[in-house]
Amino acid sequence: MKPDLPISRNPLQTRADFIYALEQICRPLKPYYSKECARLHLGNTSAGYPDAIAEMEGFSRVLWGLVPLMAGGETSPLWEFHLQGIKNGTNPYHEEYWGTIQDYDQRIVEMAAFGLALALIPEKIWEPLTSQEKDHLSAWLNQINHHQIHDCNWLLFLVLVNLGLKKVGASYDREKMAKNLNRIDQFYLSSGWYADGENAHCDYYTSFAIHYYSLIYAKLMEAEDPERAKRYKERAKIFAHDFIYWFAADGSAIPYGRSLTYRFAQAAFWSALVFAEVTPFPYGVMKGLIRNHLRWWLKQPIFNPDGTLSIGYTYPNLIMAENYNAPGSPYWALKTFLPLALKPEHPFWQTEESPLPPLKAQSVQHSPHLVLCRQEEKNHVLAFNSGHPSTNAHTHTSAKYEKFVYSNRFAFSVPRGEWGLEQGAFDSMLAVSENDQLYRVKRTCEEYQIEGSIIYSKWRPWADVVIQTWLVPGSPWHIRIHRIESKRALDSAEGGFALGITDEHNHPIDLIQNKKELLAVSAQGASGIKILYGDGKSKLTYPHANTNLIHARTVLPTVITTITPGIEWLASAVFGEPDDDRDHYHWDHAPYLRVENDAMILYTNDSDSPVFCQKMD
């Protein structure tokens, strides 16, 4: 590969290509290290913790790439910066000292990378230190054993820190390691899935946090703690057979949940499997998945003009970010480079990459409350969602966890403001207002169920408004049916998929529209909605710019309905097909609905048998 080849054209064919990709990502960081190397200042936006801690975070997150690289026998010009920074940052008498931590401190998160380094490259990080410098480093890390930690994946940061201290013969807390590992076991659900805390969501934290750290533990402690190591590996194998459905053949994954600015950490689970030498699929399949995922991401405009990673998803975007996303936070994506810890002769590097194995068109995954559908010929993967009985206080929780469907090609949108449909960007949601332009959406569910592949949920936007929703998954069509029992007069807005629009190739939006249906077509594909039941009307809304995670500008087919007090039923067929072939959409093959004997009966065009029936009251 030519040394000056842009990162978007890195073929990622060989181990050397992977090493060069990591170098390409890290090289632009050089000018941003502080004078004494213990901090990394990458921007002037802030997170919910002090800027000095954010700069320490940026410094530490680079280690998730550098440590595996050096464990595999390679070198990096950045390592001298980091070794000096570690000496100064852990020295309580130095001006760049990282400080005394507090309960629930962000520095607890960042300590985990140092635990990994002590475990994998002690000859690089521990042995070069003087006796006093070793005391400083171990004392600074040992603070983690004396403070409260969030009851979620954070528990494993303490495990990694103590594991690293143990590996270099420093003082560590064996009892707290065991206690935290036991607590993580209590988050285990079934089918390989963990919730990220008690009654919490299942999302990428299951994969790039809990499984990731557990597999590192399993690899490094399999001789000393064989029972746990075996359990972690077996759970990861089971999980892999669900999680593979989250990825399309082109390497893209479904954006769902929080912390999506970590980007290609979406594939870090597969990297941890490879590192731990766990093979639910052949190395070639996992190699192809990791490579295609990185190839997909490195073609997206995720870098700032100076080459540093931006906050956002496929483009720089602070609107979708979390309160804990500082300028250096996106470098957690480097966790995906963990296979570089394996030597060149390892079978993973020697085998040829393979495509994804044959996968079913539909996968029902009860633990995360999802039904996954695949439209292979379009590289389209969708996750239909029941919703959840509990919620959290993170940014845009309803948008990230409660939409009816999530798509790797259409993504999802987050609200820009509180007023109206354009600021709310209510794709794949039913939004309701009291005729005042202030809309409410589903945030939690009182009831939910997946029966076969049909999803049911019951939710309340107000105490005296009860909405029951049935989803019939599918692609390119899916069906949404709502029973709304309200004591209030309401306006409702049912949003389809947010469709990206661009003037780059002079492709205007084409519309098919009447009162009962609307199809919008752009260079990005087609998005549409048809009213199957109810007295609504179709409308094309224009969400504010930068609300969607993938497309900076979008349009949104929407059905607007006036709800009177009492009971009303609404039903819509929602269409989404990501393609620029405007002559081959399946818009005319919509499912149809009949009302017979006070029951809604849904049929598809290719079957005389109903696919769904619901009694109306």
Image (cartoon, grey):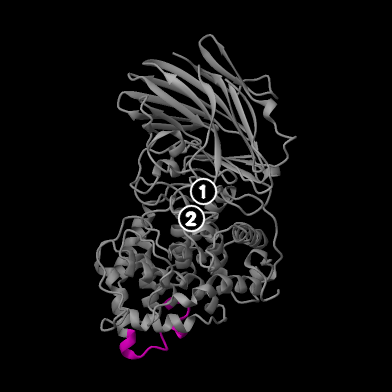
Q: Position of residue 255 (x, y in %)?
A: 52, 48
Along the line of sight, which residue is nearer the eye, 527 or 265?
A: 527
Quick check: marks 1 and 2 in contact, CB under 8 Å? Answer: yes
Query: Most extreme residue toward the right, as rendered?
Result: 583
Apparent side of residue 6 relative to residue 57 in the rendered image (left or right)? right
In the rendered view, would you say 253 is above or below 594? below
Q: Which mark is residue 312?
A: 2
Q: Is residue 498 visible?
A: no
Q: Which mark is residue 549?
A: 1
Q: Main secondary structure of the magenta part?
A: helix
Apparent side of residue 522 relative to residue 144 in the rendered image (left or right)? right
Report the amino acid beneath label 1.
Leu
- The residue at the point 49 percent across, 77 percent down is 30
370 falls in the magenta region: no
127 falls in the magenta region: yes
Apparent side of residue 302 relative to residue 105 in the rendered image (left or right)? right
The CA distance from mark 1 to mark 2 is: 8 Å
